[in-house]
């Protein structure tokens, strides 16, 4: 933990109000408050206001939001000062100081008011004086707000935390990647509100849309559609293949740069699921909705809504048809709120997914769906519960097409989908497994009953190992990118008779979303107990993507008994570590960065980039290194000037032609 000193400034009236509303990180130049909670303003009386006396002088306040404020839409409200504020509606109280020259007014908003930018006007017997603007957010600290969260620790994590970890990899090789959410960075909250104003529902009916912003369900669903650009001018363009005309998704280190770029020039190229989710988390937290980023390993993409992932193969093991797939991992967000539309049983975490996969009501959006509904298999409840249920709990069926055209099921699984569902732990840089919140334990009676109910089947599916051929794959250890290694297919025959089988063992590059790439290893033989496959760097390097994933598959079949077996594993190649050393604790600060090239060939176009909220400004700072020889170290020194006091995180990214998007981070404390 590094400590750096900066000069402290004096608190202002706005700072005091913002501090009480946990919004002081937005700065002292604007009033940002949370609904259902009082805030104070000070009125300075002029010499012409000698007759002004609290309790005797008639005056009122008007608050308005949106382009067409109306009382009927709750976007315009008028109220008079009372003895005290009221928790359940817009209200005010006022008191004059001893000198009689200033009046302190306490204003409380309704906990059900639409969020947004409001104008505040003083109406004194028809003479109106503009008092300026303030921004109103959802309030997780207010028991009457739909996003109320009891735990202070959770509020700090899910509303206030500007840094986090996004988990990627495979269920056996889970890696936490750092991310700067940066919801309090200058201008971000205005960009988040601009996203809502670019929502097609606002364009078609601004009055109804702004009024509906009182409901976090409505806002969350709108954000799910607007974070992707498929149906509108949303924030991010999704791309999983060609990135030459934009930024590779793996290069992003935080949401701020993406949101600012969108505000300046429209949809940003490019994003993939973890980027979509991280940006959605930033926007949700900025608007006051508690939010967490969630990764599902073995995530099913069910295109025909039958809650079964069906994969079809020919006799050589190649996929031949079908749009269903299983992603190595998929990332979305959970947001915390009540569900009066469903009933209190379904309050709490709600899943929404801004990655454009399937349409919902004709738009590429998904959720919010109650975690309780997902766990209990209540697929008839909105929004998009069947799709998310399948992502975490679909059964998988593999079928092979014989030369006769007949399809034969050779593999079924109830346990390969929805594994190690992960999010960052509260208050710690550790992974928390939340699989139990999404579903009952795999194979348990409850889980099968839920699946049966969701599938509307008459019988409970029973799965178990049966006599026959059993095939599995064993991976090597320490599979770092740049090395060569062997993997093994192990075939066991526990039948009473001899089987004459053929075993095919091959490896292909694979992207995290399940898209299969080029072949990078092949082996075949008649039945053996063990068949090895050597994966050499020179062969797999041209095939793999920046995800550093290789899918290894083994297939055996006995044509006489029509007995097919298939085993599959995904290799996550290890990345080299980035060494981070922060220099003398003065300003400016120098950070020394190193990375050892593990490849048997030089790295070209090498660079380091650093990014930190309150540390590096609005954009990452990049240092070009050039070329680095085989087994040599890339080194760089980067200077930065902290501007904001408090805890922060310095993110580091290394990029080159052969090794891309290698990340690390270190905690930093900037002292007053």
Image (tube, grey):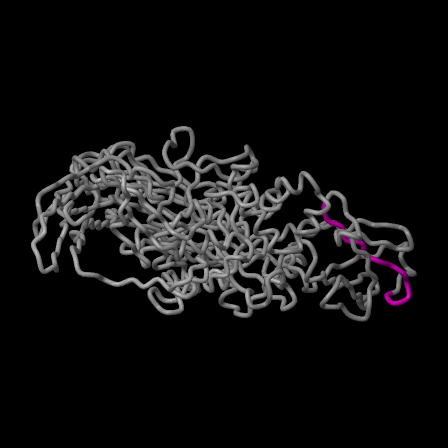
- Please indicate whether residue 15 sits to the left or right of residue 428 in the image: right
In front: 48, or 85? 85
At horizontal 52% and vertical 69% (from top left) the residue drawn is 151
Residue 11 picture location, percent across and down: 62, 59
Which stretch did the figure color magenta?
54-66
Q: Can residue 635 be seen by looking at this rendering?
A: no
- Could you say which quadrant of the image residue 198 lies in? top right
Residue 56 among those drawn in magenta: yes
Q: Can residue 599 be seen by looking at this rendering?
A: yes
In front: 599, or 595? 599
Residue 278 among those drawn in magenta: no
Residue 1 picture location, percent across and down: 37, 59
Residue found farthest to the top: 245
Residue 140 picture location, percent across and down: 59, 63
At horizontal 50% and vertical 64% (from top left) the residue drawn is 372
- Please indicate whether residue 493 sits to the left or right of residue 381 in the image: left
At horizontal 42% and vertical 32% (from top left) the residue drawn is 246
- Figure label count: 0
- Please indicate whether residue 18 sits to the left or right of residue 67 in the image: left
In front: 32, or 145? 145
At horizontal 70% and vertical 64% (from top left) the residue drawn is 38
């Amino acid at each position: 933990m590094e400590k750096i000193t900066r000069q402290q400034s004096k608190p202002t009236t706005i700072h005091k109000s913002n501090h009480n509303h946990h919004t002081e990180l937005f700065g002292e130049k604007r009033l940002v408050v949370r609904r259902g909670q009082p805030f104070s303003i000070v009125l300075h009386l002029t010499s012409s206001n000698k007759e002004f006396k609290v309790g005797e002088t008639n005056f009122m306040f008007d608050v308005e939001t949106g382009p067409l404020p109306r009382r009927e839409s709750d976007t315009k409200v008028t109220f008079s000062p009372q003895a005290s504020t009221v928790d359940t509606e817009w209200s005010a109280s006022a008191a004059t100081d001893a000198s009689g020259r200033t009046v302190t007014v306490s204003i409380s908003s309704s906990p059900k008011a639409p969020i947004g930018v409001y104008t505040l006007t003083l109406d004194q017997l028809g003479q109106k004086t503009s008092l300026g603007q303030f921004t109103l957010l959802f309030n997780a600290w207010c028991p009457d707000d739909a996003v109320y969260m009891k735990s202070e620790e959770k509020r700090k994590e899910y509303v206030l935390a500007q840094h986090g970890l996004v988990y990627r990899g495979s269920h056996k090789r889970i890696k936490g990647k750092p991310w700067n959410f940066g919801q309090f960075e200058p201008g971000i909250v205005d960009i988040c509100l601009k996203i809502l104003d670019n929502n097609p529902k606002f364009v078609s009916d601004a009055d109804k849309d702004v009024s509906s912003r009182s409901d976090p369900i409505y806002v969350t669903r709108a954000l799910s559609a607007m974070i992707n650009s498929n149906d509108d001018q949303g924030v991010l363009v999704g791309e999983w293949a060609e990135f030459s005309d934009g930024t590779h998704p793996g290069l992003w280190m935080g949401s701020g740069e993406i949101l600012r770029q969108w505000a300046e020039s429209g949809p940003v190229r490019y994003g993939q699921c973890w980027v979509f989710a991280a940006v959605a988390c930033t926007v949700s937290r900025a608007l006051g909705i508690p939010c967490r980023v969630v990764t599902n390993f073995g995530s099913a993409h069910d295109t025909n809504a039958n809650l079964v992932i069906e994969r079809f193969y020919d006799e050589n093991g190649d996929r031949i048809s079908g749009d269903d797939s299983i992603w190595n991992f998929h990332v979305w967000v959970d947001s915390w709120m009540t569900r009066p539309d469903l009933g209190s049983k379904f309050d709490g975490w709600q899943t929404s997914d801004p990655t454009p996969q399937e349409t919902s009501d004709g738009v590429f959006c998904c959720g919010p769906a109650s975690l309780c509904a997902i766990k209990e298999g209540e697929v008839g409840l909105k929004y998009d519960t069947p799709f998310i249920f399948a992502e975490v709990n679909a059964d998988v069926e593999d079928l092979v097409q014989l030369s006769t055209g007949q399809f034969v099921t050779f593999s079924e699984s109830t346990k390969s989908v929805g594994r190690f569902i992960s999010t960052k732990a509260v208050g710690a840089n550790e992974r928390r497994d939340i699989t139990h919140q999404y579903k009952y334990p795999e194979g348990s009676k409850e889980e099968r009953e839920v699946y049966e109910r969701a599938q509307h089947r008459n019988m409970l599916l029973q799965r178990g190992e049966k006599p026959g051929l059993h095939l599995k794959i064993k991976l090597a250890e320490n599979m770092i990118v740049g090395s060569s290694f062997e993997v093994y297919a192990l075939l066991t025959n526990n039948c009473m008779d001899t089987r004459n089988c053929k075993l095919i063992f091959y490896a292909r590059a694979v992207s995290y979303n399940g898209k299969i790439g080029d072949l990078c290893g092949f082996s075949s033989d008649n039945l053996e107990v063990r068949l090895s496959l050597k994966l050499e760097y020179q062969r797999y390097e041209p095939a793999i993507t920046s995800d550093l994933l290789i899918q290894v598959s083994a297939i055996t079949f006995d044509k006489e008994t029509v007995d097919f077996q298939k085993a599959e594993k995904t290799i996550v190649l290890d990345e080299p570590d980035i060494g981070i050393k922060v220099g003398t604790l003065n300003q400016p600060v120098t950070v020394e960065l190193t990375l050892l090239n593990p490849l048997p060939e030089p790295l070209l176009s090498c660079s380091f980039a650093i990014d930190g909220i309150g540390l590096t400004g609005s954009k990452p700072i990049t240092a070009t290194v050039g070329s680095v020889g085989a087994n040599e170290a890339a080194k760089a020194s980067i200077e930065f000037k902290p501007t904001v006091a408090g805890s922060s995180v310095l993110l580091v990214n290394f990029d080159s032609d052969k090794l891309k998007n290698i990340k690390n981070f270190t905690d930093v404390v900037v002292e007053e």
